[in-house]
Structure formats: structure tokens, C-alpha cells
């Protein structure tokens, strides 16, 4: 099994360093070394700063990719309109097991991040600066950096600055979670979506962005937009910080100019020459296959164009020797465990989706696959935060990327490969034993049948057993028989007992692992094929 990544893995750079300047000299740039490497920094007015961010096309580097100049102007306008001082928040939470680039920056170049944040605070007239972290190492480094600058949380300070540490959880890194924790609440989304630019910390307009975003702004403010644009692509200038792990010889954080071929980055980390697939953007990201890797370059637009995602900057290849669906199941289970537990689409939907993927691996057939797709679709755009949306995107991408393996599990006896556990997870999370790979079999031997001579379309079966039954346009079940997932055997028996027409029965499947072959979908039990079937 792949071990968890250290807080600060190996760091490399392609081309000339910007964010990682000085890393070859010292392990951590304190304030004197930071100024020696990067030089002094002049303050900028609010509109000057917004124009700079707009000229370099700076977008948030935490995953969402929102244009920074729009966020900056929105906070300024809200503060002026309401007549209140805004707040600046640096999000250095980074709670994904596969992400370390912000952790590396906070541990090794904290003053570069503070440069960008203090530029914004000065330009906006903010009197409060908060840095959100989730690790002991990042807390220590950032608190030391604030002390080196003489910044603290005294009420008499012109700028009150402090570090807020939250638990390492996927939902802790959400903007709303961080703001809620700064206000004294739990580090979970509040259940309602309010723009931080309008109402954030203490109800004040809040500029909240990712740690790397502030560091990039500090680089651009020093060297100017023209020189900044000399690195990388014309439409996406500058560098990108990536965390490369998974099936690689050397997990690393690497700074690369935009436009570098993705295959070159993978080669530097010692990835397989022909990976089975590459997960781009982290565990809220998307898979791309081996053929697509050769087309992709490191940029937001390029990865989007080939079906991938830059996201939080995590790149995870897997080799040919592991079951990709089993690897994805480990992640799906972890994502379900990371739910804040306060909205149904996340608390109920994500575990159901993980069980659905497990059922596909267990030989549940096309009915299990369709159930998985439906559950993943149902959780989207219905949660209190982006966690269910990102998790659903990951599951849908898994189904699309590994069609051959999916066919082997749905129509045959599996892909024949074990699950190596090459995708990093936090210790104790998502690493359940007995993950069904290609060589393991634990599928239910029960099948549930519909007797069309008795069925009257009451629809109760779909309410009790949605993993199997879906109602068609005529109100009748869309399958005549299907394998029952192991976890739903009790619900299947309850559906049989509660069917008003006594039209259901459960039988032991004596056909072993034979491929799924559903009976034709009938309408009202009278022998007519449903439309479109």
C-alpha cells in the first residue's frame, strides 16, 4: 500500500524558479533570507493590484480557478458600499491526501505568501489577516513568519494577524468552513451559500484565496506583468505548483512553467512509461487515459480540453498492474467518510455511490452500473458545499476513463488484477480491507424478480430498493430481474414483504458469475416493450 506523503516531499523545478527561489540555499526562508532572495516589495493601490492580477490572468490555485481580480474588486466594492473594513484570509488548509504544494510553500517560503496577503490588506484597508492551516508544521512555520515581521493579534496593532488551525478534513478547506471556524464555529460548511466577498469573517467583506495565489501575486508585483508573462503560455503565464504522487518512484512537489508537456512532468517523478491512467486535479478531479497524457500540457485550459482538470494541482498516475476501479473505490470510500454529515446528498449520497461502485466490482452487472450513475448524478448541485459535486465528478470520470475494465467487471469475471493501493490516503482513511479487485469475489448470490402478472405499479419497490429499481415513465419498474448488492440484501427482503401486489420474490442465483442478462423491459406486465427499449 502507498504510504501517506510527508508534509514536505522532494521539491524540484523546471526552468527558472519563481516561487521556489532560494530552496537550493536553505530549508526555510526566514525574513532576512527571503528579502535577500526576492528583494523588497513596494505597496500598490487597490486598482493597481487588480489590474496587475488581471494582466497576468491570475486565477485561484486552490481548485475553483476564480479570477483573482474579480474577487479583489468585489471585496473592495462591498467594503466601500457598506462602510466597513474588509478581512483578508489565506487558505493554506490543503486537506487532500494527494496535495502538498501549499504545505511546501508555507513551510519553506511563508514570507512570499505573506507578501501577497499584506499587499492586498494594505490596498483594501483591511485591519485583519488570518491564515488558515490544518497541519502542525504549517502552523509553526506561519506563526514564526508572523513573529519575524512583528505581526500579532494584539488589539492595539494596526493589523491584527493570526493563524487559525483546523482539523485535517476534506471539508475543512472549503472557504465557508474556514470562515465559520475563524468566527468560532466548527470547521464545516454552514449549510447556506453566501459569497465571502459580501459577507465573510464577522459578516465583513472577506478576500479569501489559496496560499499559492497570494505567492504568485507577490512574484508578479515584484517583477511586473511583462516580465511575469515571459514565463509560460501567453494566455496562462507564469508557473504552476504541482504535487505528483501515485505510481511514481519519487513523489514530489514541482514548479513548472505552464505549457510543459504533462508526460515530461511524469517522467521526472519516475512514473510508468505508459500509465494506465492519470488522475488530474486531485480527488475532486478527473482521470485521463494513457493516450490522452501525450496530448496534455500543464495548463488549466489544456487539461480541461482533454477531459482532465488542473484543480488543486495534484497529478497521480497509476500503472498497468493494478485495478483502476478498485483504486477509485478506495478514494470513493474516503470521500464518503469526509462528509460533514449535514446534508443528505453528501451524507447519504456519497456512501451510496461508494457502495454502488463496490457492487459494480462485485459483478453486479449493468443494473449496478446504472444505479451508480444515477446516484452520482443525484448528489450534484444539491449539497451545502462543493464536496458532493467534486466527489461525483471523480466517480463519473472513473466510469468514463476505464471502459475496458468496467466491461470486464460488468460483463465478465473482473479484470484479474489486484488493488495495489497506489493512491495516497491518510492513515486510517479509505483503506478498508477486502477491496474487490479483479481477483476477489464477494458478490451477493441473491437476485430479485418482478412477476409481471401481479405487478400493479405501486412503486414501493423503488422507494425501498433504489439501488435496483427505477420506475419508468409508465410508473412500473424498468427491470424484470437484477442482482441484489450485498449491502442491500435486507432491504430486498423488506421490499418483498411490503409489496402490496406480492409481485416480488428473491431467489438464490445459481449461475455463479455469469454475465448480467436482463429480461426485456415490459410495460404493465402485459408483454409490451417500453418506449426506447
Image (cartoon, grey):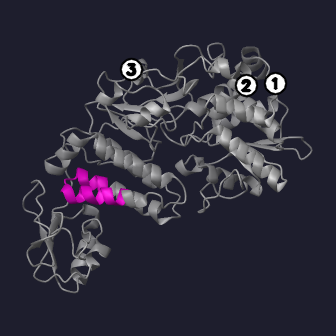
Tag shown at residue 157 = none
Check if mark 2's residue and mark 3's residue have beta carbons within 8 Å.
no
Between 183 and 480, the residue placed more toward the observer is 480
Answer with the quarter of the image where residue 71 lies: top right
Answer with the quarter of the image where residue 303 lies: top left
Residue 352 is left or right of residue 22, and the answer is left
134 drawn magenta = no
The mark that comes first in sequence, 3 or 1, is: 1
Cα distance between the residues tagged 1 and 2: 8 Å
Residue 272 is left or right of residue 314, and the answer is left
Residue 275: x percent and y percent?
31, 28
| 171 w.r.t. 273: above or below | below
Judging by the rendered image, the residue that carries numbered circle 1 is: 42
Judging by the rendered image, the residue that carries numbered circle 3 is: 270
Within 10 Å of the Cα at label 2, are there few (<14), some (14-19), or many (20+) other Cα atoms?
many
The mark that comes first in sequence, 2 or 3, is: 2
Q: Quadrant of the N terminus?
A: top left
Answer with the quarter of the image where residue 463 lies: bottom left
Region rendered in magenta: 356-376
- The answer to whether residue 89 is seen in the rendering is no
Amino acid at each position: 500500500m502507498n504510504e501517506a506523503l510527508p508534509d514536505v516531499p522532494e521539491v524540484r523545478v523546471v526552468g527558472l524558479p519563481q516561487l521556489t527561489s532560494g530552496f537550493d540555499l536553505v530549508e526555510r526562508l526566514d525574513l532576512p533570507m527571503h528579502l535577500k532572495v526576492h528583494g523588497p516589495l513596494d505597496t500598490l493601490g487597490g486598482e493597481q493590484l487588480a489590474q496587475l492580477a488581471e494582466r497576468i490572468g491570475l486565477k485561484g490555485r486552490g481548485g475553483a480557478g476564480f479570477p483573482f481580480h474579480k474577487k479583489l474588486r468585489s471585496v473592495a466594492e462591498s467594503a466601500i458600499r457598506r462602510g466597513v473594513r474588509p478581512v483578508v484570509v489565506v487558505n493554506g488548509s490543503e486537506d487532500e491526501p494527494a496535495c502538498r504544494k501549499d504545505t511546501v510553500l508555507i513551510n519553506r517560503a511563508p514570507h512570499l505568501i505573506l507578501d501577497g496577503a499584506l499587499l492586498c490588506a494594505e490596498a483594501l484597508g483591511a485591519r485583519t489577516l488570518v491564515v488558515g492551516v490544518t497541519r502542525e508544521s504549517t502552523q509553526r512555520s506561519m506563526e514564526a513568519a508572523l513573529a519575524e515581521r512583528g505581526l500579532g493579534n494584539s488589539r492595539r496593532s494596526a493589523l491584527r494577524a493570526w493563524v487559525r488551525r483546523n482539523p485535517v478534513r476534506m471539508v475543512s478547506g472549503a472557504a465557508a468552513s474556514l470562515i465559520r471556524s475563524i468566527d468560532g464555529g466548527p470547521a464545516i460548511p454552514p449549510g447556506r451559500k453566501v459569497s465571502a466577498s459580501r459577507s465573510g469573517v464577522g459578516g465583513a467583506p472577506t478576500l479569501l484565496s489559496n496560499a499559492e495565489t497570494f505567492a504568485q501575486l507577490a512574484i508578479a508585483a515584484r517583477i511586473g506583468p511583462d516580465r511575469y508573462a515571459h514565463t509560460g503560455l501567453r494566455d496562462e503565464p507564469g508557473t504552476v505548483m504541482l504535487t505528483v504522487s501515485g505510481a511514481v518512484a519519487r513523489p514530489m512537489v514541482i514548479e513548472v512553467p505552464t505549457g510543459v508537456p504533462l508526460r515530461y512532468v511524469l517522467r521526472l517523478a519516475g512514473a510508468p512509461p505508459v500509465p494506465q491512467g492519470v488522475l488530474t486535479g486531485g480527488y475532486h478531479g478527473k482521470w485521463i487515459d494513457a493516450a490522452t497524457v501525450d496530448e496534455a500540457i500543464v495548463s488549466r485550459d489544456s487539461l480541461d480540453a482533454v477531459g482532465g482538470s488542473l484543480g488543486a494541482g495534484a497529478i497521480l498516475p497509476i500503472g498497468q498492474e493494478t485495478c483502476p476501479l478498485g483504486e477509485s473505490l478506495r478514494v470513493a470510500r474516503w470521500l464518503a467518510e469526509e462528509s460533514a454529515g449535514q446534508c443528505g446528498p453528501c451524507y447519504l449520497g456519497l456512501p451510496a455511490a461508494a457502495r454502488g461502485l463496490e457492487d459494480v466490482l462485485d459483478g453486479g452487472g449493468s443494473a449496478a452500473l446504472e444505479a451508480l450513475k444515477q446516484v452520482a448524478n443525484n448528489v450534484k448541485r444539491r449539497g451545502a458545499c462543493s464536496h458532493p459535486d467534486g466527489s461525483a465528478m471523480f466517480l463519473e470520470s472513473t466510469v468514463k476513463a476505464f471502459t475496458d475494465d468496467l466491461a470486464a467487471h460488468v460483463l465478465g469475471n473482473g479484470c484479474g488484477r489486484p488493488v495495489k493501493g497506489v493512491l495516497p490516503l491518510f492513515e486510517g482513511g479509505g483503506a478498508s480491507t477486502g477491496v474487490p479487485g479483479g481477483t476477489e469475489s464477494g458478490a451477493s448470490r441473491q437476485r430479485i424478480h418482478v412477476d409481471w402478472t401481479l405487478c400493479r405499479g405501486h412503486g414501493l419497490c423503488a422507494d425501498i430498493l433504489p439501488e435496483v429499481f427505477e420506475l419508468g415513465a409508465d410508473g412500473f419498474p424498468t427491470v424484470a430481474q437484477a442482482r441484489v448488492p450485498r449491502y442491500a440484501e435486507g432491504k430486498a427482503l423488506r421490499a418483498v414483504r411490503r409489496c402490496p401486489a406480492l409481485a416480488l420474490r428473491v431467489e438464490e442465483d445459481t449461475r455463479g458469475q455469469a454475465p448480467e442478462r436482463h429480461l426485456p423491459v415490459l410495460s404493465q406486465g402485459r408483454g409490451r416493450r417500453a418506449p426506447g427499449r
